[in-house]
Image (cartoon, rainbow, N blue to C red):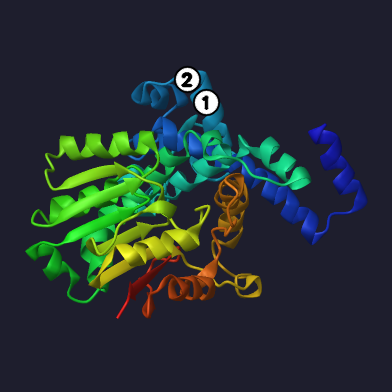
Amino acid sequence: MAETRAAGTQAAGPTEFAGRMLHMVNEGMLALMVSVGHRTGLFDVMATMPAATSAEIAARAELDERYVREWLAAMATGRIVDHDGAAGTFSLPADHAPWLTRAAGPDNLAIETQYVGLLALVEDQVVDCFRHGGGVPYSSFPKFQALMAEDSGAVRDATLIGVTLPLVPGLTDRLADGIDVADVGCGSGHAVNLMAAAFPRSRFTGFDFSDDGLTAARAEADRNGLANVRFVKRDAARLGETARFDFITTFDAVHDQARPDLMLAGIADALRPDGVYLCVDIAASSKLSENLDHPLGPFFYTVSCMHCMTVSLADGGMGLGAMWGEQKALHMLSEAGFTSVDAAHVDGDIANTYYIATKN
């Protein structure tokens, strides 16, 4: 069938858009193979090897040769790896490795390709929502939190302590002296554990409603011997704290809530009078027309449709979506009770806006 379609396209006369569609189909399939390469560690292995045969690469990676050979064929035709036909060898170009290996940290874009396969698992359910409304619940995304933890973990490791927290004037000194801190929607707790390790005099609380996430968070805290952090199961929309914390954070946790308005109001209530809220969320405009050239526009809108928006709607929520944008964010923060909000950006970070909000 694929051959018939390709021939039919050629017979009708190729157009620029038809060429783009063929490119898209190839790139979509390639994204799945890049995801496989990341998950199996093949990129990490090849980055340490000279040009080698499929058998040598499979042996080093401890994988089945036949599958590795077919994967390499996809990588070679996709120009991800180089292939020497005469020698029968494959190699990972030195300028590709910094974007494909775990050693690359937050620059490892292979992590992002995992969303393609993950979101495809709920395609039938999302199509049904197009026809009948409603949403797809969190329970239909069993691997989403683990992927988010891997995705954000590399970024937090590289930037949280040295770049993100210093965006708030005087904050690192206060953390060093000892204050009460909360991370709402903490997921697997990596960010709050990083802060707890860096600032042992401060006291940290992570809130989330996911049992799996909280279990992972507590396990990491135990492994690192952190006595100044605790994790509490709590609905973000029903935080129920009053003047309890000096500093509160959320990391990409607002836009997919059923009731982000109640979450933000609860955070405002939970802050002490001189407290600060740092909301890290997707960098975008609230106007689609201003996002047409966003470098991650198609990615974020797709993830929003297939996850962020639909999980909110599944819970009878607002369906805010990942691309709620700075204008909407500033309005909602004001409505929640914050009187001063600055939207900061970090050089090189095209994905996030850093909202620094206070009540005085």
State the SS at label 1: helix
Residue 39: x %, y % from top left: 43, 33
Residue 205 coordinates in the image, percent (x, y): 24, 50
Give residue 69's mark: 1
Question: Which residue does the image show at 78% across and 59% down from the upper left?
Answer: 17
Q: Position of residue 154 (x, y in %)?
A: 32, 50
Q: Is residue 172 above or below residue 69?
A: below
Callout 1: 10 Å neighbours few (<14), some, many (20+)? some
Q: Visible in this render: residue 141? A: yes
Between 36 and 130, the residue placed more toward the observer is 130
Where 90 falls versus 150 (above or below)?
above
Amino acid type for the residue under numbered disc 2: Glu
24, 280: nearer the viewer = 280
Seen from the viewer's position, the closer of residues 339 and 174 is 339
Tell me which amino acid carries mark 1.
Arg
Q: Which mark is residue 328?
A: none
User: Does residue 271 appear left or right of residue 202 in this picture?
Assistant: right
